[in-house]
Image (tube, rainbow, N blue to C red):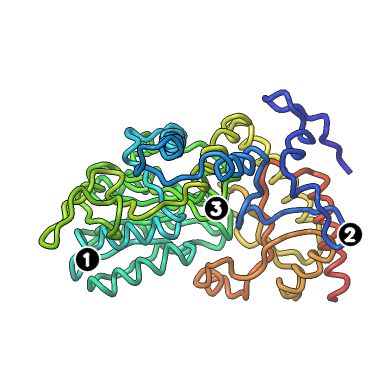
Amino acid sequence: MHSESATILNTGKSIDDIRSQFPILQTKVYGQPLVYFDNGATTQKPLAVINAMDEYYREYNSNVHRGVHHLSQRATDVFEETRRKVTAYINAAHDYEVLYTKGTTESVNLVASCFGKRFVKPGNSVIISAMEHHSNIVPWQMMCEDRGAILKVIPINDKGELLMDEFEQLLDDTVSIISVNYISNSLGTVNPIRDIIAKAHAKGVPVMIDAAQAIQHLPIDVQDLDVDFLAFSSHKMYGPTGIGILYGKEKWLNEMPPYQGGGEMIKTVSFQKTVYNVLPFKFEAGTPAIAEVVGLGAAVDFINGIGLDFIQEREARLLDYALNALKKIDGIRIVGEAKERSGVISFLVGNAHPFDVGELLDKQGIAVRTGHHCCQPLMDWFEIPGTVRASITFYNTEEEIDKLVAGVLKAVKLLS
């Protein structure tokens, strides 16, 4: 066993101090201390986030942008301050390029719908990759069906890496937009998005990046990447569920029609004609998830306080440790062995069904994800029913990885 409690962070706090800020990590499951390796599905929330949302409901619960009274003005100030924090976090050029959505899924749907309506014609095509989450497949399929366009898929190799030569073959004059994930939620592959963006832009094609699995693991600078659209979810970065971000370059957002109609997204309304509001409000119809935005702001502060550089370095070390430990298990198969990877280890052991392994780990207090991880086409490509997925974040420890390995060994023994 390994003790990491003496590891001092750049915040001057130990890992034990950091873990103590996450109340759920102190709980027990079936009498065992919780070992949480389902961070790819959702991360746990620190007290800073929980308290910020509690304070909003206790002290200044009110609608935003609509009231002259004190509570509304205070809520509006915090709401827009979070937008500025996110703008700085991803280094967007303008805060009105940062739109609030329900999460990555709604962000992708918004672009597929609005960009599709304005720019995609019959006979055009859209490129995605073979390792996309369903939320970056289905909206594009729906849009292609609606617009008479074709969906093209970048294939992968056995390690779970994109075949970039094949991508260049797909990138012809019919392509309207490309949408790929930064990091695969099921394989942990870090995709060469700079290369994809450069090749696309050389042909005048915009690129959308699904950053749901990247935003919490590594620094993202949208201006440096020169990406056209970028989507992510608060709940993957220690914030609340039900709120996410769509970044879009001003030129595209101005040219796209609104996604939904209602309050806030209008300048003037008559029964004859509606004039739409300016960015970002044009895409933010109705009362937003205000408490969740408050929580997202606290989550950004929390990450900044710890430091993404530290998070990245620690997670890389934990990932190496976990891979080395798991590979010693007889009959284990790691699914996805890309050279560039982050955050996730997907595996199978012998003939054991991933669901059975996951259930037996749960009885030992160890939370992992099992199944196809919303990546059915990818699992079909590998010809497997799914995997056991352990997803790691900086508050995990080497002791927890040791427990995972012991738990897998015990599960396999029971199943054999």
Q: In front of the other: label 1 or label 2?
A: 2
Q: Which residue is mark 1?
A: 124
Q: Residue at x 27, y 46 (%)?
A: 201
* Element under disc 2: loop
Q: Is residue 314 visible?
A: yes
* Element under disc 3: loop
In x, y percent, where is residue 307?
60, 30
Horizontal placement of 227 versus 392: left or right?
left
In x, y percent, where is residue 411?
84, 68
Horizontal placement of 10 versus 166: left or right?
right
Horizontal placement of 27 versus 117: left or right?
right
Q: How far apart, in angstroms, are the residues tagged by discs 2 and 3?
A: 35 Å
Q: Residue at x 66, y 67 (%)?
A: 387
The numbered mark at residue 389 is none
Which amino acid, mark 1?
Asn
In this view, the residue in front, 89 or 183, is 89
Task: Say if 371 sits above or below 108 in the image.
Answer: below
Which amino acid, mark 3?
Thr
Q: Is residue 230 visible?
A: no
Q: How far apart, in angstroms, are the residues tagged by discs 1 and 2?
A: 57 Å
Q: Which residue is mark 3?
A: 189
Task: Say if 62 sits above or below 188 in the image.
Answer: above
Quadrant of the frame with the C terminus: bottom right
Quadrant of the frame with the N terminus: top right
Q: How far apart, in angstroms, are the residues tagged by discs 3 and 1?
A: 28 Å
Q: Which residue is mark 2?
A: 31
